[in-house]
Image (cartoon, rainbow, N blue to C red):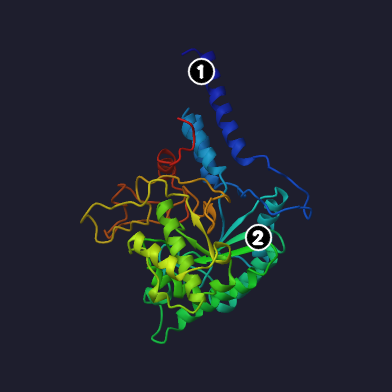
Amino acid sequence: MTARVRARTRTLTVAAATAALAAVTAAVPAHASAPGHQAAAPTTLFTPPANPDANAQILDLAKHWQLKDAAGLLAMTLTPQAVWLDGGATPAATRTAVDKTVGDAARRHQLPVLALYNIPGRDCAQYSAGGAANTADYQAWIDAVKAGIGNRPADVVLEPDSLALLPSDCGMDDAQGTKTTERYDQIHYAVDALEPLAGTKVYIDAGHSGWHSINDIVPRLVAGGVDDATGFYLNISNYRSDSEIAWYGKLVSSCLAYVSGGGDAASCPNQWWSVNDAQAWLDANVHTAPAAMKHYVADTSRNGQGPWTPPAGAYTDAQDWCNPPGRGLGARPTLKTGDPLQDAKLWVKIPGESDGQCTRGTAGPNDPERGYQDPAAGKWFPQQALELLHNANPAVLPH
């Protein structure tokens, strides 16, 4: 290769990489409008700045002429996603961060999704351990979030795993159930603080269809204050299919309506009933219009291929939720689901960010499904990012 050709190749490579990175970091805001002059609620979702390591991966792919992957990851990062707030800052800093996100979204006339993740004892002290030190600190943090939102539009996904993974579920409670009672009170405090805000909708934790039965999760939702919230959310950071989510969501909403009328959650059909039997029960016992029922949102960020089935007998704890191989991006986020009970499909879990260092019951430190050590929870996982892109359903880019 001549020096002139080599120089031209380097120039083209840098140009392609620079264009890709510029598109990531300087996307033009859409539908801008003056603050305080929004005529209607937002109809599009907000896209926050991408993980800086995602930008670095896109740049590296472009430099190496892997332009289709670079373009695919670029499209993935430019898809609306949640903004996670996980504590670790003063109330003043939290208020400022929330104000910036909600303000940026409002200027674009877009709806931000805030995933609040700071409950005391979160994740049962596992991969995403942390959270506020106590109830008083948590309430102060929620008050800061409230002040940051103000009267501008926001959807709040309140404390993933907080109700599906109670202190009593993981040996973190005392004999009197004190910690679990506190958990319910903390969630209810947040609902009561945030739901009355003019533009805010609050959704609380209902796990997913492969976890708790309807008969178990509905009482938890009631104890957590779902009556005072817009509704609940499903499938955060998980992989259940859209059809499975929709059926489970309908059963949860219907059982909540039945309970609000004086019924017992133990009588409700659950996800393991036959569809025909469950529908017959609903027809006979639930007559509430969908508009008057509790609605839900669902995380479709990584469910394009459905859940992973671990190899039989391979692991003592397969951790099927933890960086499972072969998964794909799911349905793109939208506020128009076609389902009267489902308010939105969202990307809450940021695709490409690790679930944690998964060892699947082995001594580790490698993930035995991958042959290397996974990044820590929340860190960028380049191999998984490409995996999700390549297995996306629907595809991110035209074939």
Q: Secondary structure at mark 2?
A: helix
Residue 206 visible in the picture: no
Query: Is residue 95 shown above or below 33?
Result: below
Classed neighbour count for the residue bearing mark 2: other residues with Cα under 10 Å, few (<14), some (14–19), many (≥20): many
Q: Is residue 391 above or below residue 193?
A: above
Q: Amino acid at mark 2?
A: Val
**Residue 33 placement (x, y as % from top left):** 76, 47
Residue extending furthest toward the bottom: 176
* Disc marking residue 6: 1
Q: Position of residue 309 (x, y in %)?
A: 29, 52
How far from the left and from the top, in percent, is residue 286?
47, 69
Residue at the image position 55 percent from the left and 50 percent from the top: 81
Pick whichever, 133 or 292, lies toward us.
292
Location of the C terminus (image quadrant): top left
From the viewer's perspective, is 325 left or right of 153?
left
Query: In the rendered image, which residue does mark 2 sit on?
Result: 98
| Local crowd size for mark 1, using a 10 Å CA cut-off: few (<14), some (14–19), many (≥20) | few
Looking at the image, which residue is at 56% across and 75% down? Answer: 188
Q: Residue furthest front?
A: 284
Residue displayed at 40% across by 40% down: 391
Q: CA distance from mark 1 to mark 2?
A: 48 Å
The residue positioned farthest toward the left in the image shown: 313
Look at label 1 and name its amino acid. Answer: Arg
In percent of width and height, residue 210 lies at 36, 61
- The answer to whether residue 345 is seen in the rendering is yes
Q: Nearer the viewer, residue 396 or 121?
A: 396
Between 198 and 254, the one nearer to me in the picture: 254
Q: Quadrant of residue 99?
A: bottom right
Q: In what element is the residue under mark 1?
A: helix
Q: Foreground mark, 1 or 2?
A: 2
Which mark is first along the chain, 2 or 1?
A: 1
